[in-house]
């Protein structure tokens, strides 16, 4: 993965002296770890993989000397209690001959170490030709302690999150974990891999079936921040403490954004109306209500003068406003949208007042 990000042209090779230390995190402090296997890795165009290995000394120290490519990336790993831990990757710059202070932090394990969901990002696209809607989820998991979370046994996961019951075509994306570690079990996605202290990203996708009227995203764990992006701009969203934010553009596609925290047991609901969207449906209901009022007035003998010229003009004005602004709330300024709402309400109120009074001027 890293190799594809490296520059195509290498400036050359040089002997690199690399040194660092393996430390154990415990109770907010660290202690050196002796006698563990330490491996140095290089990811470049000439070589991708382990280069050499040593045992850490009594002070947890390690030292390597090898030919490194300029433009490659170097990192170190140490295996402790059956789990592989990695240092931060370091890019090799031209002329660099020494690299010191590299640290590999390892930790003891626990099957009960708490795991938090720092954030959850859900992107729902428009329906495809077969009617299904593609969904991408990116979940940021956080281990706030100094113990690595492991499963209680070989079959147990370290974290699980629920999927919509109707989810189809589950697949794992290019995150921190592979499809062998991240799998679907019934209506849940389960991670069966150690979670060391810090943050890890989990990425997966699925599809919502064609004809689904309401998508329900369950929330098993309290989430610090949920960001929901829906490509169909007029779909109503409810649940948690989500609030409507702005509209975002990605590769020429517009998405309505909802954001906020959610508590354990909450559910986020997105309503997918068939035919017209929710805003279009509301406008249609409003127009039908006004039309029904006109019909009722005529049936009661309140005959609009000149075939209801002013009534038709008011209805036409409302229809023109609706046609101009329908589905564009996220594309115009808040001031312009507010003016539209105010003018529509004024026209509707005036028209309804005339009809209620049986005003012949209507």
Image (cartoon, rainbow, N blue to C red):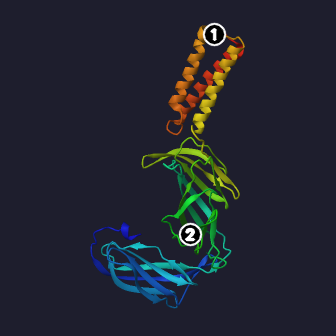
| Apparent side of residue 225 relative to residue 1 in the rendered image (left or right) | right
Count numbered badges in the picture. 2
Q: Horizontal and vertical percent for residue 163?
A: 62, 60
Residue occupying image coordinates x 27% and y 72%: 11
| Apparent side of residue 40 relative to residue 153 in the rendered image (left or right) | left
Q: Horizontal and vertical percent for residue 14?
A: 30, 80
Q: Which residue is mark 2?
A: 182
Inter-mark Cα distance, 2 to 1: 70 Å
Residue occupying image coordinates x 61% and y 49%: 212
Closer-to-camera residue (160/276): 276
Q: Which residue is mark 1?
A: 361
> Which quadrant does the N terminus fall into?
bottom left
Residue 138 vertical placement versus 28 (above, below):
above
Give the number of the disc on residue 273. none
Q: Horizontal and vertical percent for residue 36?
A: 52, 88
> Which quadrant does the C terminus fall into?
top right
Closer-to-camera residue (105/333): 333
Residue occupying image coordinates x 64% and y 49%: 269
């Amino acid at each position: 993965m890293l190799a594809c990000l490296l520059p195509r042209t290498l400036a050359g090779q040089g002997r690199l002296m690399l040194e660092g230390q393996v430390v154990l995190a415990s109770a907010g402090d660290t202690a050196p770890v002796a006698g563990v296997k330490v491996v140095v890795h290089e990811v470049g165009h000439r070589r991708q993989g382990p280069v050499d290995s040593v045992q850490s000394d009594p002070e947890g120290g390690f030292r390597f000397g090898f030919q490194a490519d300029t433009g490659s990336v170097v990192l170190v790993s140490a295996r402790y209690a059956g789990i592989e831990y990695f240092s931060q990757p370091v890019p090799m710059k031209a002329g660099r001959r020494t690299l010191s202070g590299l640290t590999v932090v390892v930790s003891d394990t626990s099957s009960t170490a708490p795991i938090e969901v720092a954030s959850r990002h859900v992107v729902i696209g428009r329906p495809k030709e077969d009617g299904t809607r593609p969904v991408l989820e990116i979940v940021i998991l956080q281990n706030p302690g100094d113990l690595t979370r492991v499963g209680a046994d070989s079959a147990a996961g370290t974290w699980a999150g629920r999927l919509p019951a109707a989810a189809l075509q589950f697949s794992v994306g290019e995150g921190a974990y592979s499809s062998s570690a991240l799998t679907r079990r019934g209506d849940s996605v389960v991670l069966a891999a150690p979670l060391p202290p810090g943050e890890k990203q989990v990425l997966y996708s699925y599809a919502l079936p064609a004809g689904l009227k309401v998508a329900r995203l369950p929330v098993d764990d309290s989430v610090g921040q949920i960001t929901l992006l829906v490509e169909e701009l007029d779909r109503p969203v409810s649940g948690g403490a989500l609030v409507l934010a702005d509209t975002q553009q990605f590769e020429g596609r517009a998405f309505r954004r909802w954001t906020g925290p959610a508590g354990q047991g909450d559910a986020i609901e997105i309503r997918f109306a068939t035919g017209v969207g929710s805003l279009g449906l509301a406008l249609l209901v409003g127009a039908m209500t006004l039309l029904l009022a006109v019909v009722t007035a005529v049936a009661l003998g309140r005959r609009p003068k000149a075939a209801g010229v002013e009534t038709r003009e008011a209805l036409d004005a409302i229809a023109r406003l609706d046609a101009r602004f329908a589905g564009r709330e996220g594309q115009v300024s808040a001031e312009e949208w507010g003016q539209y709402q105010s003018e529509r309400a004024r026209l509707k109120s005036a028209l309804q007042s005339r009809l209620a009074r049986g005003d012949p001027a209507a």
